[in-house]
Amino acid sequence: MATLNDIGVAAAINILTAFAFLLAFAILRIQPVNDRVYFPKWYLKGLRSSPLVNGGAFASKFVNFDWKSYIRFLNWMPAALQMPEPELIHHAGLDSVVYLRIYLLGLKIFVPIAILAFAVMIPVNWTNNTLEHSGLTYSDIDKLSISNIPIGSNRFWTHLVMAYAFTFWTCYVLKREYEIVAAMRLHFLASEQRRPDQFTVLVRNVPPDPHESVTELVQHFFLVNHPDHYLSHRVVYNANKLSELVNERKKIQNWLDFYQNKYQRNPSRRPSIKTGFLGLWGNRVDAIDFYTSKAERLSRDISAEREEVTNNPKSIMPASFVSFKTRWGAAVCAQTQQSRNPTMWLTEWAPEPRDVYWENLAIPFVYLTIRRLIVGVAFFFLTFFFMIPIAIVQSLANIESIEKAFPFLKPIIEVKFIKSLIQGFLPGIALKIFLIFLPTILMIMSKFEGFISLSALERRSASRYYIFQFINVFLGSIITGTAFQQLNNFIHQSTNQIPKTIGVSIPMKATFFITFIMVDGWAGVAGEILRLKPLIIYHLKNFFLVKTEKDREEAMDPGTIGFNTGEPQIQLYFLLGLVYAVVTPILLPFMIVFFGFAYVVYRHQIINVYNQEYESAAAFWPDVHVRIVVALIVSQLLLMGLLSTKGASQSTPLLITLPILTICFHRFCKGRYEPAFVRYPLQEAMMKDTLERAKEANLNLKGFLENAYIHPVFKSADDNGSDSDNDITTGEWEQEPTLVATKRTSKRFTPLPSKDGGSLLSSDEVNNERSKT
Amino acid sequence: MATLNDIGVAAAINILTAFAFLLAFAILRIQPVNDRVYFPKWYLKGLRSSPLVNGGAFASKFVNFDWKSYIRFLNWMPAALQMPEPELIHHAGLDSVVYLRIYLLGLKIFVPIAILAFAVMIPVNWTNNTLEHSGLTYSDIDKLSISNIPIGSNRFWTHLVMAYAFTFWTCYVLKREYEIVAAMRLHFLASEQRRPDQFTVLVRNVPPDPHESVTELVQHFFLVNHPDHYLSHRVVYNANKLSELVNERKKIQNWLDFYQNKYQRNPSRRPSIKTGFLGLWGNRVDAIDFYTSKAERLSRDISAEREEVTNNPKSIMPASFVSFKTRWGAAVCAQTQQSRNPTMWLTEWAPEPRDVYWENLAIPFVYLTIRRLIVGVAFFFLTFFFMIPIAIVQSLANIESIEKAFPFLKPIIEVKFIKSLIQGFLPGIALKIFLIFLPTILMIMSKFEGFISLSALERRSASRYYIFQFINVFLGSIITGTAFQQLNNFIHQSTNQIPKTIGVSIPMKATFFITFIMVDGWAGVAGEILRLKPLIIYHLKNFFLVKTEKDREEAMDPGTIGFNTGEPQIQLYFLLGLVYAVVTPILLPFMIVFFGFAYVVYRHQIINVYNQEYESAAAFWPDVHVRIVVALIVSQLLLMGLLSTKGASQSTPLLITLPILTICFHRFCKGRYEPAFVRYPLQEAMMKDTLERAKEANLNLKGFLENAYIHPVFKSADDNGSDSDNDITTGEWEQEPTLVATKRTSKRFTPLPSKDGGSLLSSDEVNNERSKT
């Protein structure tokens, strides 16, 4: 039970920490030597060149001596806010802009709520003296919360009315925001120039056919079933092994560069390494020779593997990118069922080329259901039982076992100060490490599940991360105990007992969550802008590896916006804000500071730092929307539970209608706005097609689409200077006659023997289709 | 607690009742005078003509004197089974055949289960003596059930293994049946001749436009967005008032006929009626004159209203049936989103013309969500609180209040025998009346909800009726108490307590359900074949109204298969069978007799009696499938609850996996087979189009589709001899130029002023579309 004073102290500490981070950032960012760490986005856009190359005094290339720039150390803030939204869309893509709108949404929701709550509810709560008379220990925070209202008081009607007001306001803002984002998305898609994914559909689960190869089959199928619209297609190769080899060679090349640099700096001694594990033991050999021969061997392997992939029909997956002559044709194909068997010839919009996650295209479709099931079960166990392995590690990693394993450390450990430090630190470390790796684990799960675009992977990871946080951070903090214990309790509790149990603990945890917001939110966001990890890694790489400007380019790690970790974090704040809005409104200002501060910081980062990996045109917004709605419903249920223990059960019917209304609101929004994120209206497609035909009558669309959907490992072949054969990049693309003779000989069930090849496609193919059905 | 003896007696009574019904049926059906009651299907098909018309002795026209035909009184049974399935599909449609397969499915599931249960579980249960030693009262039935196994016995493993075996068998049969039905549906759709609904799509929520009428708007929109496929369209008129008037006139005409008949039979006295309420009071007038003038007035109203509907643009609904040149075009349009705003230009497959429920086409689309919500809430209250008004009626309808209201009845009521009869009868009568009207109430709800096809209405009513029966008949019989009391209990109970509470009561209710099956199932089905109600009504109509053969045709009421009441009844039996298969297997033979008997009876009825109102090509099967899966899961959960009270909790993990597996099975089936019932593959459409083009190169499709989707009130106009103007039936259908000048003058946002009309559609329309976005 912290007092207002304690909170003040904690706030001061956290503000100071954040301030220190900001100060460090302000100093570091204006040093030219850090330019590539703090402004990589501009380098990627080609709008900024390295200050190391330009002229000027040697020292000023690395350190900034202009004292004036130190005075204006916070001037990045207004700068970050200045860029107008349309320019920002052009600069960093719609995804980033809409991502920033989530923070703005937080402000839009919580600022009016906070004003109302402070104007109405704080006085209502404060002017009681239940807690003073109760004889319980209490803090000033509690005096401002719902706990201070006596049981059965009529004042609870205020909270009820406020709950309605907050719900309506939140829904109104959510609806408006959904409307705006949907319009932004449609406008973005409409105004955008021609993109390959507008014309392309991904076909999966092409059925096996003993007479025809996948490419022939795909061609025949679409020539028959979309005769007026089919343009061309590109089969998908299983090039996972090849890209592994290419990555491997890149790593070897890095090491080779490193030793060559070392040798150049100190030509007197050729560097040598040990060949064993991690270079710790084994024979000592000449490093440059070793890596040169290794790189050569890999290059040979790569060209052999490339040959294999291109020529072996088994490396062709039963999937294909099919391109159409018009956007209309693609929109039709993507939204319709093709074949009688609904698990065959599955079509969906092709992701943007850079958004494709190529590794997963090689997964046979049949395994996807099984994989989904496995991941579902694994995630369940991860969420509810993750404490078990951590507890085991914790029980092993105590001082006694360390002393047993490493007896030579005993004298150091036995020093009292160090011992207490380790004892205090050790139990937490396994949990901390787990939590740091959790997003990676979730990402691996999503990858295993077989999504074929980076955006879908991130969306799924984000939703899992949110569930994990909801159960283990939110519920876990309110009802202390592991998730499994909670689960067990819930199963054995009656249905209407659950909101009560949680609702009652909520006011007591307010101070904990205030501290959480300050540490995780304020200081965390300030830490984000400092970019300590990329800073260190960049300078290490710069020192050891960089020879040319191109190397420096590669050493730069701009990072991405990190939707899969960032969005769930914001959602946790939405949840806390909505839950505490009625119960302990004092929490809201802390929340608002977080949203405002994070908005500025992330806007700065998006403008100057983050690289845009893909553009999904804000496809994630329905997820964001639904999670805020869920938070709203949770807050309503918990309030219901809380009030029912406060002798205000006559308000229950009024409270029950709230979640029902919210669900209706959600269904309305889903019907009205979600299709804009899922489907592609034919009207839109036809309009663009017509315009394009009018503007560029003789456009070579085939040429435009030709190399769009090639596995990057084939694309980058030339870069690595290997003997790239252009079999895949130009093969089977050109020689496509409109009428194709089928290769089949057996015509089961076909009454008349049809001629073997040479016949026109249309009637022949119909026979084939008939014989299959 | 009934003994085996009691059950035997009940069985004997019910078998005798059923036998009596069958005997009555056998005698009545071979009387020529009843021919139209028991063989209406053949009359409808035009394969049988009235025996009254044909020659022969006068008496033998009405009564059958052939004594031989009385001996073979059960020969309808083999006759009903003889017609092969393909012929039956041709005779009565796929819906009926697949409906019969539900009964067959019951046999397929329960016969092997019963054999296994009798071979394994009855001995295992019987060879204990727990009940004998328990000192409780028990019956022989209980000795055969799971109640006879001592607590904590290892014999429960048998039940566990059996639960697995039954689940796997049920799932296997279900999967195979889904596969067969899906194949039957696809084959039916493929082999079927050209139908208007294959080419037609229903467009709803056409946005209002100040410059163009709905018909122009629809035409422009589809000419622009489906230029290669659009053929024609037909707007929907709000003709509800008109069809009301037409129905009214038909009723008046009936009365007119009645009095004219009366007058012809007895020309000495002109019939007269009173004009007041129900003909009980008011002025006495000449009946024939009265009705003649009334019919004339209605005819005038009808032609005025018809004029109004045709000419007033307000009577045109923002909906339209749009026809395409190819099945492919229609399939594309039905499955894709048309406009940027997902709530506008909504397309779906048009129902078969006779399946359209015209009244609901006039409902504006915006109201549908609200209506759905209202019906949802209403159904909730109907299910859980229906006992309240009935209890009120019951409390009012006691002997004292009757005596008060009708004092002159007092001497009769006070007779002891009559009094006890009324006292025993009265409380149940309100409930009985409610239950009789329940399907009608549910159908009204579905109609209010706004479904636009009869098949959808029946499907939705069926699913509501099933939920009602599940809660009020199944759960209500097991845990005695009203549904609301149950709901209240469940909310206050812990989640895992619910299956326990129900599970424990299950074995005790076995005898009740056995009796229920015999009364509701055996005797009920036998009553169905007797068709007592249509028999009486037919003869009444025949006596009072029938003048001509055509009148007799109309007096015939073949009825329909009644999916909305029949299917939920079968589902209740599936539920009982699956729940009791492990617990009290002695119930299974009663179930099997029901399924077998009902199969024969309904097959006979479908062949000889029921009229096919529409053909949905077995669109209801996914509903049937999912309800059996739900029954399976319920049975597993209840078994889990039961076993956990029997000290066999170590088996819980094994039992929990069962519902999970079942859900996985359901998801698999849904993904694999459901699309066959929802979507229409392009491959299929293209194949049929190509075949048709090859076979009938110059087919006049426009002529074929012309009058398909006209409101029946316009179609039947000629029949009623009114002054039908053919405005609607032939209007705006012919004069459709391919290029249509728009009527709009305002071109917001269009950079160049486009010419007012006269310009080519394509570019002009694109401008319009642009100006809207």
Image (cartoon, coloured by chain):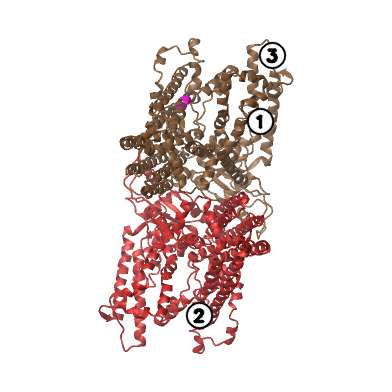
Chain colours: A brown, B red
Residue A490, horizontal then vertical, whole percent: 51, 45
Q: Is residue B422 visible?
A: yes
* Residue B155 drawn above or below residue B720: above
Q: Are marks 1 and 3 on the same chain?
A: yes
Residue numbers of the magenta segment: A524-528
Residue placed at 57% from the left, 25% from the top?
A423
- Residue at the disc numbered 2: B35
* Residue B758 drawn above or below residue A44: below
Pick whichever, A418 or A518, lies toward us. Answer: A418
Which subunit holds the residue at mark 2? B
Label 1 CA crowd tier, 10 Å (few <14, some 14–19, many 20+):
some
* Residue B398 drawn above or below residue A238: below
* Residue B404 picture quarter: bottom left
How far, Cα to Cα, is label 1 from label 3? 28 Å
Task: Point out the tag, 1 or 3, that comes first from the N-terminus.
Answer: 1
* Residue A279 picture quarter: top right
- Residue at the disc numbered 1: A245
Which subunit holds the residue at mark 3? A
- Residue at the disc numbered 3: A270
Dominant secondary structure of the residues highlighted in magenta in the image: helix
- Is residue A527 on the magenta stretch? yes
| The N terminus of chain B lies in quadrant | bottom right
How far, Cα to Cα, is label 2 from label 1? 84 Å
Amino acid type indicated by mark 2: Asp
- Is residue B241 on the magenta stretch? no
